[in-house]
Image (tube, coloured by chain):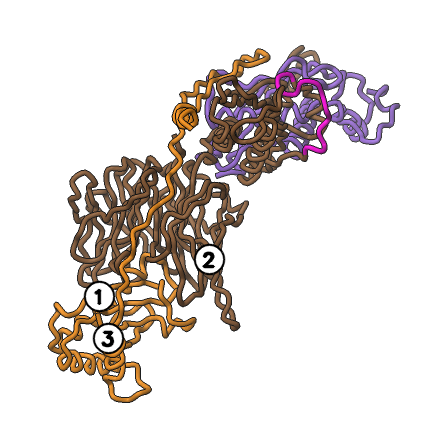
Amino acid sequence: MLKNKFYAKFLIMIGAVLILSACSNSGDEAMTETPTPVEQTPEPVSTPEPMAAPVDMVSQESLNSSMGGSMSEGDMVYFAYDRYDVDASARSVLGAQANWMKANNVNVIVEGHCDERGTREYNIALGDRRANAVKNYLVAMGVSASRIRTVSYGKERPQGTDNAQNRRGYTRVN
Amino acid sequence: MKLLKILMLSLIGLISAALPAHAVIEIDITKGNVQPLPIALTSFVGSGDEMTSAGSVMEIGKQIARVVTADLERSGLFSAIDPRAFINSGNAATAPQFANWRAVGAQALVTGTAVLEEDGRVRVEFRLWDVLGGSQMTGLRYFTAPQNWRRIAHLISDAVYKRLTGEDGYFDTRIVYISESGPYLDRIKRLAIMDQDGYNHKFLTDGSYMVLNPRFSPTSQEITYLSFYNDIPRVYLFDIETGKSEMLGEFDGMTFAPRFSPDGKKVIMSKAERGNSDIFVLELSTRRLERLTKHSAIDTSPSFSPFGRYVTFNSDRGGSQQIYVMDSDGSDIKRISFGQGIYATPVWSPRGDLIAFTKQTGGKFYIGVMRPDGTGERILTESYFEEGPTWSPNGRVLMYYRKYPYDNQGGGGETQLWSIDLTGYNERQVITPLDGSDPAWSPLMD
Amino acid sequence: MAALLNKIPEKLSITERLAERFGPKEQKATSLDVQRQTMSIKAAFRLKIEGECWNPPSGALDAGKLIVVVNFNLSQDGRIIGQPRADDYARMSGPLKVAADSALRAVRMCAPYSDLKLPKDMYDQWKEIKLTFDPSDMLS
């Protein structure tokens, strides 16, 4: 065991030397190669334990139905392609959200999402724009900014295969 | 010229007596057929067949030849001759019978041996021969622990590639990418790393939180990437040797789209504050963040030029996503993409001559290249969705990922890694155990 | 020339083609004939090397600018005497050296040149060949 360990350390070096040409050829270029150390094989990775963020389902449901009608999606607003402006239908949803927040002492997270017809990095930025557009509207309606956190998932968390349904802002109870 | 002169002279009466006794015929050769170079590779079988700590030395010798063959073939620049066609002839390793190799169509020949040394190491030698010229082009000898034979094979591939193409190889490299699995509504995305030929595959994160956009440091020892650990998207640094990762600075707002500077001392990235993404540079030693752009538009996907003097990035400041270039202090911002459609993810070639990009137009996505001044745009590949090119360290090959459309049965949506030669030929899938996206090519290891 | 004609080969040599075209009436080649012959010899070399033997390296940075000159000597029966030589080969490195290698391979691949049926009576005109390999038209 000890011997193996020693070998592992000692022999991990790779040496490379030029083999002299077997037959003479004036065109051969003299090559030199410096010894090439090999890096240690990476150890198995220990990954940090993620913290689960449980959602208070009761509060979420009450947020969902804050519009009143059971069929409505009170926690969701939608955006046009590559846009982040809050349109009329989104404004009515967000107005209800703001009223609900004023009546319920909870903090929320606003998620910004995109469709898949764009690059990952741009969509992360676009999702952030959308989440902040939602937040800004809620703040304008009188909700304290400190109660709203935003997060962008870009195009990484679709809710279906319909692009229009994926360009969305989703408000959830923190 | 000479002959023309002679002709003139003869026409004025000095007739045939003026024929020179000796002349050189000068001919311009301006056309050829670009095709893979036929190359023969023999098994690296030495004199013995002793057992090593990584199997029999004869088997190691055979495997090395197979790995080198696969490397060279995958480049598209070589076609390996089927060993079954070889004409058995004497001591192939040190004194090949060139006529026999020419007879099977080989223009280059790689011979070699793997021998177990008394100290337990394996000695691997190879020689590259010019079959038509009957001479040795290069030859190297390596000593290593037997379990490192695969790395030796890639080093040999690089040496052969370099001698026959004049450019550095890219076989002793690794790929870090995002391994994807699970249904599309709940995709698990993990950081994964493998050799460029898919071997030595390893997961670096366990998938309990989402990761995206990994990129190697210039030493290949660190990876910077975007992690959603704790549901807070931030740029992280992963140390491959220790397996540990750390957040790169705690700033207000999300950080994303990271990439190392060529000297490895900085990470350039986007930072979003209140919905506005701009480009910043983080100095690793001080963790100081310096702003490069300040604009209400989205500025993202920054990439340094090879010597760090310029930065190319993606911005929609002109109304649609386009590619821009600026000095690395943030000054002198110029738009360089003017073709039809929108442009994103610009990445500077390691040899500096080109910027690769993702383009989107007419419902399709494309990978292409243009010069840093925006001229010479060339599209290399297109599909329903593809993005995120990464350069091989010699600036010759691009890797990217493709995503397939969803079908009506709840399937589709697969992601795969692909590579293509800069010439637009030799497009191939890079095989991964699960789905794969966001590839990043390491520099040559050393 | 007349002697060559009697062989009736499958493919006519340059000399034969010339003879057919201009007739064997002149026993001695004039300078005009030499000029025509030389053009034909050049064309034959070009056709063979460009069509069958040159595989230029592509993809290198500025691959189109890698111009290489190769000289070689031929025996009367079209074999290469000694080795073909690339100008400045010893001082070359990287992509330029690789370009020279490809030119040398092309010259060797195409040898022997007996199938070009080079006119033996004009051996002095073609015993020394200088080829300039210039890929600028095909790679840019």
Of B318 and B385, the residue lying toward us: B385
Position of residue C61 measured from the top left corner of the image (x, y, whole percent): 44, 35
For the residue marked with disc 2, what is the amino acid? Thr
* Direction from residue C29 to residue A160 in the image, left or right: left
On whether residue B89 falls in the magenta region, the answer is yes
- The residue where tag 2 is placed is B415
Chain identity of mark 3? A
For the residue marked with disc 3, what is the amino acid? Val
Asked if disc 3 and disc 1 are in contact, CB closer than 8 Å, the reply is: no
On whether residue A114 falls in the magenta region, the answer is no
- The residue where tag 3 is placed is A86
How packed is label 3: few (under 14 Cα within 10 Å), some, or many (20 or more)? Answer: many
Q: How far apart are labels 2 and 1 at the CA level?
A: 28 Å
Q: Secondary structure at mark 1?
A: strand
- What color is chain A drawn in? orange
Name the N-terminal-most of marks 3 and 1.
Answer: 3
